[in-house]
Image (cartoon, rainbow, N blue to C red):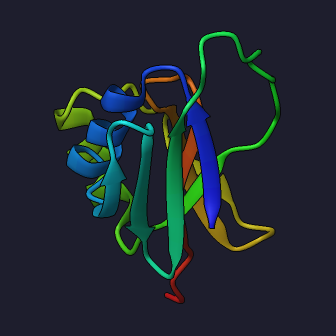
Amino acid sequence: MIQLRVNDWPACVAWYGDVLGLKTLMIDEQGGFALMEAGGAKLAIKARPSAEPIVASDSSIVFEVDDLEGERHRLKRLGVEIGTIIENPAEGFRECRFADPGGNAVTIFAWNRPV
């Protein structure tokens, strides 16, 4: 399970459900907690108390997709400011990077298919 602490909990929960299409498994609005299904993993989105400091990191949430181009275009149509496709032939994948409403780094990637 991945745990993501966010300042704007309602916006992030809606974004991960509506934009990325994650299924909501549990919501505790009063406690500021949502549990979402992300493929074989779970994503916990927790409200960050206003007094809690924001800790910067180089980490990101990464999702594997079957159709990178199609998913990139779908996200752009939904208003996501998404980068261009980055090729990584040495490691055998391609990726695009963007941010969620709270500024957390998100990456989608697809393995290169044999030609």
Q: Nearer the viewer, residue 102 or 8?
A: 8
Q: Position of residue 70 (x, y in %)?
A: 26, 58
- Left or right: residue 104 versus residue 13 is right
Find residue 88 and report its horizontal and vertical position in percent: 71, 59
In depth, the one of 73 and 36 nearer the eye is 36
All told, the count of numbered labels is 0
Query: Is the residue 41 above or below the residue 49 in the image?
Result: below
The percent position of residue 108, horizontal first and vertical second, equals 50, 55
> Does residue 109 appear in the picture of this structure?
no
As drawn, 99 above or below 89: above
Q: Is residue 39 left or right of residue 61?
A: left
Task: Specify the quadrant that holds the N terminus.
Answer: bottom right
Q: Residue furthest top?
A: 51
- Residue 75: x and y in percent read 28, 42
Give 111 or 104, whichever is nearer the viewer: 104
Q: Name the residue located 53 percent from the left edge and 40 percent from the top edge.
A: 46
**Relative to 72, 82 lies left or right:** right
Residue 4 visible? The answer is yes
From the viewer's perspective, tell me whether residue 34 is left or right of residue 80. right
**Residue shown at 36%/36% (left/top)?**
30
- Which residue occupies the extreme front position in the image? 30
- Residue 26 versus residue 49 in the image, above or below: below
Q: Look at 56% across and 76% down and name the residue there.
A: 112
Residue at (41% x, 30% y) in the render: 9
Residue closest to the far bottom? 114
